[in-house]
């Protein structure tokens, strides 16, 4: 796809595989490799995983299908799309505006985690962290995040890198990278799982991941699991609407969404199976928080021949997966600025990056200069994550589901979903529609109200 202009003529993704690769490129990222293990470890393991799986199926998948359909129907950024699709004077476009805010909040901390991954490419290459000695891996991570200069400079490197790719145009940047390298990351994760499963206390790790202890399941944990389902599939904030706007009319939306969901779950499960057996074998703490993956992965690689090379490759591939997700996050504000404020793509990208350099630094400095600063009991890194994943995305999901279920109704929904006017699977469309109309909005609402202790 070539660079699109703001005059309305838009190109589509070039092929069915391009659509799948690009959508997958948005979904798969640090959410799988970093956030999923971190949250699963911090929230009790299997019971959290179970709620996350249910949220993905009952809420995530239908909302994803609705969001992509809305984007393809309107062929515009989320704000313009919702203005065009909604009845006159109804403010559904606020979903897009909230999405733009969520995008900045997520990018602010996400870009910092990408920064850690970039820094770890060099650390892995140097061999200095290739050990299962937790004092060494913990010290290495601690030194990185508590150094304000390194934290900021690596984040700027990440932002400059993303800006460069974004200016080259969506397809060239995302499709090409994703297509070639995703399978390699997958293979490396499979290898890591094999290594991890051969460790002494692998069984304890598997039990933690698959044997639920429901006493650990609180309403707050359920909200976190729901938030993760949204974050993982890049939904609730207009990202998938934006990607949907590049889908062609003959491309299969439910099929693509289903495949993306399955592949995404597979990658997360592999990451979990690679991490937790090692956590238990080497005596790490499952609830170590954001450090967990960065201190455990080196321990796993220290067990195999060529560990140094393979770990370097692992962090490079993780950086690339994170790049696809970051670009899709940036696409929301960039496209809104481009299409609604008539900025050139270059200017929209530069403005987004400049704003991010400011809001991102608040997260980059969370563990150093700003370490004493808390709002609502959370540091800014965690606060930005909480507000975006646990509030804005699920709320966006409620309204996307309500829009498809009640404003559109079945006829318009199924028409938006169909390929060149032909509905492939009517029964499936009805099930998805039923979920969107009744189940998803209610479930999200209840989990949010309970999780936030409103009642
Ligand atoms: N889904 C991405 C991940 O799991 O890493 C993160 C993400 C991308 C969230 C795009 C939201 C979004 F709009």
Image (spheres, rainbow, N blue to C red):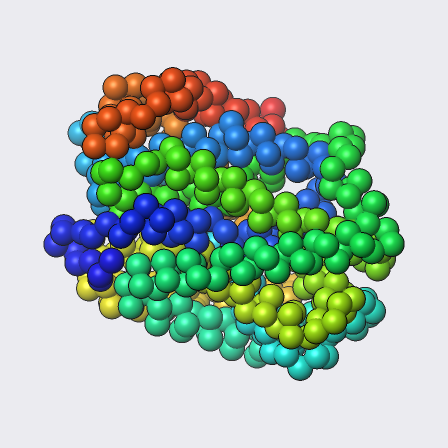
Tag count: 0
Work out whether 126 lies above or below 254. Answer: below
Percent position of residue 264, x then y: 52, 45
Residue 64 placed where, x, y %? 41, 36
Q: Could you say where residue 274 lies in the image, as x and y percent from the top left? A: 70, 54
Between 418 and 222, the one lying in front of the other is 418
The answer to whether one can see residue 130 in this image is yes
Quadrant in which the N terminus appears: bottom left
Q: Is residue 223 visible?
A: no
Residue 213 lies in what quarter of the image? Answer: top right
Q: Can you tell which quarter of the image residue 141 is in?
A: bottom right
Residue in the foreground of this view, choosing between 303 and 285: 303
Q: Which residue is painted at 57% across and 55% down in the image?
A: 186
200 sits left or right of 392 in the view: right
What residue is rendered at 72% in x and 66% in y?
Answer: 301
Quadrant of the snapshot with the C terminus: top right
In the rendered structure, the answer to whether residue 75 lies left or right of residue 332 reads left
Q: Nearer the viewer, residue 439 or 395?
A: 439
**Residue that sits furthest to the right in the current view:** 200
User: Residue 108: x, y in percent?
Assistant: 48, 60
């Amino acid at each position: 796809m070539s660079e699109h202009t703001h005059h309305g003529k838009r190109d589509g993704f070039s092929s069915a595989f391009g659509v799948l690769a690009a959508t997958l490129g948005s979904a798969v990222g640090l959410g799988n490799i970093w956030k999923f293990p971190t949250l699963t470890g911090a929230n009790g393991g299997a019971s959290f995983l179970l709620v996350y799986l249910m949220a993905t199926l009952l809420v995530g998948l239908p909302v994803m299908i609705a969001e992509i359909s809305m984007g393809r129907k309107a062929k515009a950024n989320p704000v313009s799309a919702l203005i065009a699709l909604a009845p006159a004077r109804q403010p559904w476009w606020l979903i897009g505006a909230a999405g733009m805010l969520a995008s900045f909040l997520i990018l602010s901390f996400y870009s910092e985690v990408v920064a850690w991954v970039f820094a770890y490419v060099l650390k892995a290459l140097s061999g200095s962290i290739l050990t299962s000695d937790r004092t060494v891996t913990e010290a290495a991570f601690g030194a990185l995040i508590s150094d304000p200069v390194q934290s900021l400079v690596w984040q700027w490197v990440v932002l400059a890198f993303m800006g460069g790719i974004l200016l080259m145009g969506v397809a060239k940047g995302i499709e090409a990278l994703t297509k070639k390298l995703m399978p390699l990351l997958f293979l490396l994760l499979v290898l890591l799982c094999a290594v991890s499963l051969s460790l002494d206390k692998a069984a304890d790790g598997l039990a933690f991941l698959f044997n639920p202890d429901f006493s650990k399941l609180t309403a707050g944990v359920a909200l976190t699991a729901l938030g993760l389902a949204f974050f993982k599939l890049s939904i609730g904030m207009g990202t998938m609407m934006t990607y949907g706007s590049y889908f062609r009319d003959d491309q299969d939306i439910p099929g693509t969404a289903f495949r993306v969901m399955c592949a995404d779950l597979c990658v997360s499960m592999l990451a979990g199976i690679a991490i937790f057996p090692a956590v238990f074998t080497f005596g790490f703490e499952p609830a170590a928080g954001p450090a967990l993956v960065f201190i455990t992965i080196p321990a796993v690689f220290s067990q195999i021949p060529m560990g140094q090379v393979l770990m370097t490759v692992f962090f490079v591939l993780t950086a690339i997966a994170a790049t696809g997700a970051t670009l899709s996050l940036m696409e929301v504000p960039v496209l809104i600025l481009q299409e609604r404020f008539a900025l050139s793509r270059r200017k929209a990208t530069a403005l987004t990056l400049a704003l991010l350099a400011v809001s991102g630094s608040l997260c980059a400095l969370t563990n150093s200069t700003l370490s004493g600063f808390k709002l609502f009991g959370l540091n800014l890194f965690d606060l930005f994550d909480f507000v975006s994943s646990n509030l804005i995305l699920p709320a966006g999901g409620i309204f996307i589901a309500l829009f498809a279920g009640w404003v559109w109704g079945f006829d318009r929904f199924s028409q938006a979903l169909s390929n060149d006017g032909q509905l492939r699977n009517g029964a499936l469309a009805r099930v998805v529609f039923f979920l969107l109309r009744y189940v998803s909005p209610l479930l999200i609402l209840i989990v949010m109200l309970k999780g936030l202790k409103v009642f």
